[in-house]
Image: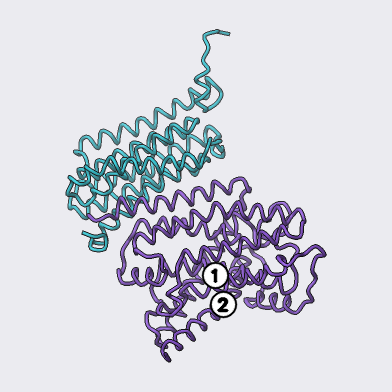
Amino acid sequence: MHLSELSLFSQGILVSAALVLFTSFVMLAQARIQPLIYAFAWQGALLSITTALVALVSGHTHLYISALLTFGLKALLIPWMLYRLTRRLHIQYDVEIVAHPSLTLLGGAVLVVFCYYVALPIAQLSTLVTRNTIAVSMATVLLGMLLMISRRTAVAQVIGFMSIENGLFFAAVASTYGMPMIVELGVAFDVLVAAVLFGVFFFQIRTSIDSLDVDRLNRLSERGE
Amino acid sequence: MADNLNGWLWAALQTLLFIGGAPLLAGWIKRLKCHLQNRAAPSLLQPYRDLAKLFAKDLVLAHDASWIFRVTPYVVFGAMLLAAAVVPLVAIPLPTAAIADVIVLVGFFALARFFQALAGMDIGTAFGGMGASREMTVASLAEPAMLMAIFTLTMTASTTNLSVAIQYILNAGLVLRPSFLFALLSLAMVAVAETGRIPIDNPATHLELTMLHEATVLEYGARHLALIDWAGMIKLMIYAVLISNIFLPWGIARHLTLPGLALGTVAVTAKLALLAVLLALWETVLAKMRLFRVPQFLGFAFVLSLLGILTHVILESAL
């Protein structure tokens, strides 16, 4: 079946999946903290739109709940918490120096190709509408990891971590129309708790090493002053 | 034969409309920007007056100017004229469609840019050389991104011919293609860089250390400057028409009938006017970026077009 023969909603799934991937790249390219949080919020919103569209096309009504949950948590609550944290830590206008920005982006593109290669046999076995987006969801996971690796500040790493979780949720929706509701609820609240704990950690890191640059944690010495 | 001649006549008319309308588009953008920035706006026809004034002036040439310096304005304008002839503006079935190839278009741009860089260095002033070097830096980064964005389109329509591609998109009807979204974004970023708009270059300033395009044409005056300025306006219009007619081709005339052509003209005018609003907003919201940030900007454009190709393969392959 060709793309033009799909219904508009199925095409919409593909477009919003592509946009989720796009926000991952925006996060990789964005060096400032606040726009990074906005990009993360957009990713959550797009993910919930994708989920809602999948629910509409496939007729799995429980996915609407997942979509609502995703929107509430990942597009509104967690970004708002992170935003408030950056305000309280006075780092909202910080610009991180990203080493080799263009190289990181190209590395991201290579990861997408890799994911396509890995997901190809899965996509060929699957019969779902969303089977082509499995590669995209895997790429979102790996791009989140790349974000964590390439950044040094704690806030950016946390956003990378949350984006990995976004990718995992997306993979579940794309490959099996979502996880069982109980698992999804559990994961959602885990992420929420993680966000709260990260906030506490930010303050701890900040008071102990005077910075949110986690590279400085490598320089621990046993000489007590 | 008569039919063929008729076609060429329409093609010539379309090209005239193209180069005649380019200053109007530039004036419209300038006017919008003035309104957005709370300044008194010049008339829509101001670019025409500027061009007329420049054409009427006496030519002054630098002592060290060689033939390259004198020939460049004509080469640049000629290249843009040919490029404008190739791009479908109002109608598709014109005899120029046979050469309406995107690679040819990129070639015309490269030719014009090459001569402009040569002319910048020809006089031997520091600014000319600096401007030429910067212009070539930006171009070498923008060109691959543009070609990749176009290849995305090419992979969908299986052709590099603009008319055939537009015809294909029209025939397919409303299809949401993720790859086109990326190609559109990438092409828009490249267009901003190539036409010297904010955030890459500021078209309204002559501040020595920040100018790119202006530095190479600093020594030009009178009709030479008029030709180069006009060519710049045509280039902006070409990019605007490319973006609006490839990604939103609806309204373009598919047959050479008078109502169709009239509708095509109205449609393309509306699309360009809207696009100009977006450009003016973009230029008002953003600030010019440092020169050393430009590779990152264009690198992102390149990655976007690469993503366009990847999403075409991943998401739009036969299911």
Give a yes or no on whether discs 1 and 2 share a subunit: yes
Q: Measuring 69% from the left and 53% from the top, which residue is drawn there?
A: B210
* Residue A137 visible in the snapshot: yes
Relative side of B287 to A63, left or right = right
Q: Residues within 10 Å of mark 1 (few under 14, many from 20)?
A: many
Q: Which residue is mark 2?
A: B21
Q: Is residue A83 above or below residue B297?
A: above
Of residues B201 and B32, the one nearer the viewer is B201
Instruction: Give the quadrant of residue B283.
Output: bottom right
Q: Measuring 55% from the left and 61% from the top, which residue is drawn there?
A: B281
Q: Which chain is purple?
A: B
Relative side of B140 to B156, left or right = right
Residue A148 in the image: state x and y as whole percent.
43, 33
Q: Which residue is mark 1?
A: B237
Of residues B181 and A162, the one nearer the viewer is B181
Relative side of B264 to A55, left or right = right
* Residue A37 visible in the snapshot: no
Q: Measuring 44% from the left and 51% from the top, which residue is drawn there?
A: B304
Q: Name the chain letter of the residue that bears numbered label 2.
A: B
The three-letter amino acid code for the residue at tag 2 is Gly
Give the colour scheme of this rendering: by chain
Instruction: Give the quadrant of residue B214.
Output: bottom right
Residue B206 in the image: state x and y as whole percent.
72, 59
Q: Which chain is cyan?
A: A
Give the residue furthest to the bottom: B2
The three-letter amino acid code for the residue at tag 1 is Met
